[in-house]
């Protein structure tokens, strides 16, 4: 009887050990039938990570119930808990959703339409009149009110102003790159679902929380390395402090 009991116990222990042994899991990441390369595949449980290749494929050692995170810029963060069945099938397919593009505000300015006819001299006079009126409405009236123009309009000055005006319109505007702040990087790295569901923050608390995190000197190191896992661990740790301050 004792022998049978020992055999049964050894079988249970070996089966438990086998179930807890890491297995190799193969998978592929895609979005709308397009394979995604350079996706960060992070095993939150084992603290290990890999990247997908040019075919969207990855290989990772996992155990049942391991928590996997899939991250790539411009896509929603994907979370997945590995099941024993997925490990046995060894062919995990992950579909990621692209972030909605935000359209910039566009200002529409109504301008006077000018129709050209076959009479070039007449149309040229219309163009000259329109240009003079454009300048006169902006600076001409002010100059005359200030007494700058004694005998009506100064056409030499108008010509110079028009030349400057049209040259400025043709010159492309130089764009100054925006400064990358911690709050912007944190929002791009972790989606809103992470803040609302994982950190249990209210929507109106997110910006205040990120300002609180920015005060910590460690946030500068996080910005330098720009690592998804480091960012999430840092935000989780700061959230504990933030909740204590609230209470």
Image (cartoon, rainbow, N blue to C red):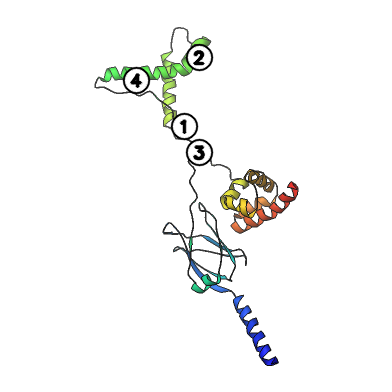
Query: Mark 2, mark 1: which one is toward the viewer?
Result: 1
Distance from Cα at disc 2 to Cα at disc 4: 22 Å
Can you tell which mark lies on residue 127? 4
Mark 4 residue element: helix
User: Which comes before the other along the chain, label 2 or label 4?
Assistant: 4
Q: Is residue 112 above or below residue 243?
A: above
Q: Which residue lies furthest to the left in this view?
A: 118
Q: Which residue is drawn at 38% across and 23% down?
A: 112
User: Which comes before the other along the chain, label 3 or label 1?
Assistant: 1
Q: Which residue is drawn at 60% across and 50% down?
A: 186
Q: Picture coordinates of residue 117 (x, y %)?
A: 26, 22
Q: In this view, does 15 lie to the left or right of 104?
A: right
Q: Picture coordinates of residue 23 (x, y %)?
A: 56, 74
Mark 1 residue element: loop
> Which residue is under mark 2?
142
Q: Picture coordinates of residue 14 (x, y %)?
A: 63, 82
Distance from Cα at disc 2 to Cα at disc 1: 26 Å
Distance from Cα at disc 4 to Cα at disc 3: 32 Å
Q: Are marks 2 and 1 in contact (CB under 8 Å)?
A: no
Distance from Cα at disc 3 to Cα at disc 1: 18 Å
Q: Which residue lies furthest to the top in this view?
A: 151
Q: Are marks 3 and 1 in contact (CB under 8 Å)?
A: no
């Amino acid at each position: 009887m004792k022998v049978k009991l020992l055999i049964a116990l050894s079988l249970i222990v070996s089966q438990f050990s086998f179930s807890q042994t890491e297995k190799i899991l193969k998978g592929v990441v895609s979005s709308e039938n397009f394979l995604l390369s350079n996706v960060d595949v992070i095993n939150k449980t084992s603290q290990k990570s890999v990247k997908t290749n040019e075919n969207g494929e990855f290989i990772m050692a996992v155990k049942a119930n391991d928590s996997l995170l899939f991250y790539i810029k411009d896509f929603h963060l994907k979370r997945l808990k590995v099941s024993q069945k997925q490990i046995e099938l060894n062919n995990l397919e992950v579909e990621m959703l692209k972030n909605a593009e935000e359209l910039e505000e566009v200002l529409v300015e109504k301008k006077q339409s000018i129709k050209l006819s076959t009479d070039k001299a007449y149309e040229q006079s219309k163009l000259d009149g329109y240009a003079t009126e454009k300048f006169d409405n902006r600076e001409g009236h002010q100059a005359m009110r200030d007494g700058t123009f004694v005998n009506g309009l100064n056409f030499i000055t108008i010509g110079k102003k028009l030349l400057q005006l049209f040259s400025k319109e043709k010159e492309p505007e130089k764009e100054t790159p925006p400064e990358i702040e911690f709050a912007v990087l944190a929002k791009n790295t972790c989606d809103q679902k992470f803040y609302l569901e994982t950190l249990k923050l209210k929507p109106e608390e997110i910006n205040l929380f990120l300002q609180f995190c920015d005060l910590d000197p460690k946030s500068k190191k996080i910005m330098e390395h720009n690592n998804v896992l480091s960012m999430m661990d840092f935000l989780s740790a700061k959230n504990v402090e933030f909740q204590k301050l609230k209470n």
